[in-house]
Amino acid sequence: MLQFYFHSTPNSMKVALLLEELQLRYELMPIDIFKGEQHDPAFRKINPNGKVPAIVEDGVTVFDSHAILLHLAQKHGKFITSGPAGYAAMLSWLELVATGLSPFSGQAIHFLHYAPEALPYAQNRYVREVERHYGVFDQRLAESEFLAGDDYSIADMALFGWANSASYILGEKGLTDYPNLARFVSRIAGRPAMVGVLDLWKKHRFKTDIDAASRRAMFPQNEQAAS
């Protein structure tokens, strides 16, 4: 059976959504990153980078959320846009999430919520880049039902993983400034597969305190630099 290593993060949500859309059976392997479980030697053998999500199935290990999306979608022949133009569009938007929205969102969250002191320049830099990316996606969704065209694909699941929790960066206004993206998020949130995803999120309680121990677990390189 497929083993799914996860934490309640946007990147894990992308994979959880695809697993539910594919209606696959899987074993949950929670990794509490606030407690440092991602540094356990056993998990490091699965992902040397010490990040979630990751999967193991039939002796095959895949880590990084977008690698997992591509692997599973190609294996099962679903949620990948067909035809050269459609596939190219899907891949382009999928990678824009991977190389643009995802890292800028991660840095915005870090400086807004995890950094031990407020750094206005860093907060402004990363939040503005998140907003810029959401503007790009909003414009695309004004022109197209889904990112790659008429077909729902893993590119949409990748975007949903972050956009569904946009308020953690953008505050109470959330996606108000991006009506097409907001409509897109509502549509995917209403899919039957999301019932399973939300149930998964309720099954496991992870540590939520952002204390010194959590910072050491999540950002050990910062501790090394400080010492």
Image: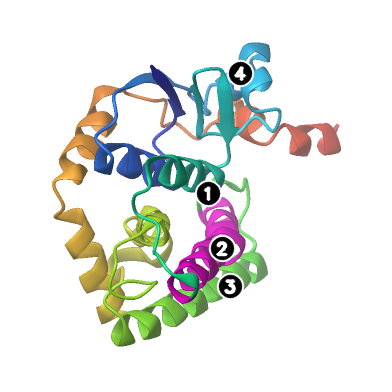
Q: Are marks 1 and 2 in contact (CB under 8 Å)?
A: yes
46 is higher (above) or lower (below) than 141 = above
Residue stretch rendered in magenta on the structure = 85-112
Q: Residue 2 sits in which quadrant?
A: top left
111 lies left or right of 201: right
In the picture of the structure, the residue carrying the numbered disc 3 is: 124
Q: Amino acid at mark 3?
A: Asn
Mark with earlier residue (3, 1): 1
Q: Position of residue 192 (x, y in %)?
A: 13, 46
Q: Nearer the viewer, mark 3 or mark 2?
A: 2
From the image, tell me which residue sits under label 4. 43
Q: Which residue is mark 1?
A: 66
Q: Nearer the viewer, residue 146 or 50?
A: 146
Q: How many marks?
A: 4
**Which dot, 3 or 4, sits closer to the camera?**
4
Which of the pair 146/137 is nearer the observer? 146
In the depicted structure, whether residue 226 falls above or below residue 113: above
Q: CA distance from mark 4 to mark 1?
A: 19 Å
**Mark 4 against mark 1, which lies toward the viewer?**
1
Residue at x 61%, y 62% (from the top left corner): 99
What secondary structure is found at the residue carrying circle 3?
A: helix
Q: Earlier in the sequence, mark 4 or mark 2?
A: 4
**Quick check: 158 left or right of 21?**
right
Q: CA distance from mark 3 to mark 4?
A: 35 Å
Q: Residues within 10 Å of mark 4 (few under 14, many from 20)?
A: some
How far apart are labels 4 and 2 at the CA level? 26 Å
Whole-number angstrom distance, CA of label 1 to CA of label 2: 8 Å
